[in-house]
Image (spheres, rainbow, N blue to C red):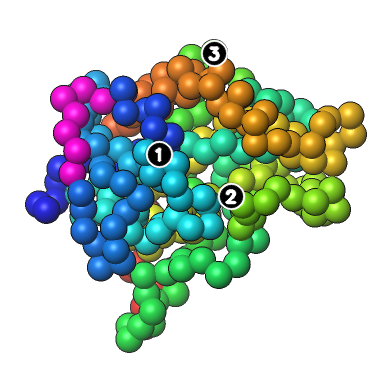
Amino acid sequence: MPSEQAEIGIFGGSGFYSLLENARDVWVETPYGLPSDRVALGEIAGKRIAFLARHGRDHRFPPHAINYRANLWAMKQLGVTRIIGPTASGSLRREIEPEHMVVADQVVDRTAGRKDTFYDGPITTHVSFADPYCPQMRRIAAAALQSLGITVHEGGTIVVISGPRFSTRAESKWYQDAGWDVINMTQYPECYLARELEMCYVNISLITDYDVGLPGAPPVTHAAVLQVLARNNERIKTAIAEIARTTPGERTCNCGRALGAARA
Ligand SMILES: [Zn+2]
């Protein structure tokens, strides 16, 4: 598979395929096995895009069973330098309401047992992850969402849980008391593995629910999440397309040099 097939990678739901012009599908083999599905290569507003359904097109991989390393490696192999990672997320704060979007700037990993590094030796590699999300792409994404009239929260901390179960009330209260904003099951290690491969990563959290434990709000259910996703499918697609369209070619961030200080 020759590189430089695409410049921007998108992980998302299968509804996004219709965004792409001149799309064709490719399987990308990686040293970590196959990614979640075929990658669709196509264009949005003249930009070369690689799209991959992180759960598979038929949604067969739950969050804890996704081969994140294969998914990220496939993007890198296709030449991708920027990744847009929209996710459905729960809100941990009253003012972050369902159907709002959050451009996160921090992440807390509460997952367990996921394969979350490409660097198992022999070259020991400690990658800085103080600022997990690309600052340039965050600005671009927030501006794009605002230009579409979407209520967007700039900045926010995502706590990532293993799933597939939702939180208990006590866990959710703990996350709220810690001051975290949004909860999700797939951001880690997806965002981190992008950094290990020196790709920019930006998350757009579409808020689908209030998790559990916010007084007066019913506990999250999968059915309710799907309803909000269905209602917001077109908004999300329009938002992703606008982010891709307004992403300039030049990278002004340090994501592409992440390994520079990571090895002795
Ligand atoms: Zn970057």
Question: How far apart in space, not on screen, are marks 3 and 2 (Cα)?
Answer: 27 Å
- 81 to 146, vertically: above or below: below
Quarter that holds the C terminus: bottom left
The residue furthest bottom is: 122
Question: What residue does disc 3 label?
Answer: 149
Within the image, what quadrant is residue 251 found in?
top left
**In front: 205, or 157?**
205
| Residue 57 pos. (x, y %) | 37, 38
SS assignment at label 1: loop
Look at label 2 and name its amino acid: Met
- 128 to 254, vertically: above or below: below
Q: Is mark 1 within 8 Å of ligand 1?
A: no
Q: Identify the residue at image location x=32%, y=54%.
A: 35
Question: What residue does disc 1 label?
Answer: 58
Question: How far apart in space, not on screen, are marks 1 and 2 (Cα)?
Answer: 18 Å
Q: Residues within 10 Å of mark 2 (few under 14, many from 20)?
A: many
SS assignment at label 3: loop
Which of marks 3 and 1 precedes in the sequence? 1
The magenta-colored residue range is: 19-26
Q: Identify the residue at image location x=35%, y=50%.
A: 36
| Residue 154 pos. (x, y %) | 59, 33
Is 73 placed left or right of 169 in the picture? left
Look at label 1 and name its amino acid: Asp
Look at label 3 and name its amino acid: Gly
Question: What residue does disc 2 label?
Answer: 185
Q: Residues within 10 Å of mark 3 (few under 14, many from 20)?
A: few
Is 164 placed left or right of 80 in the picture? right
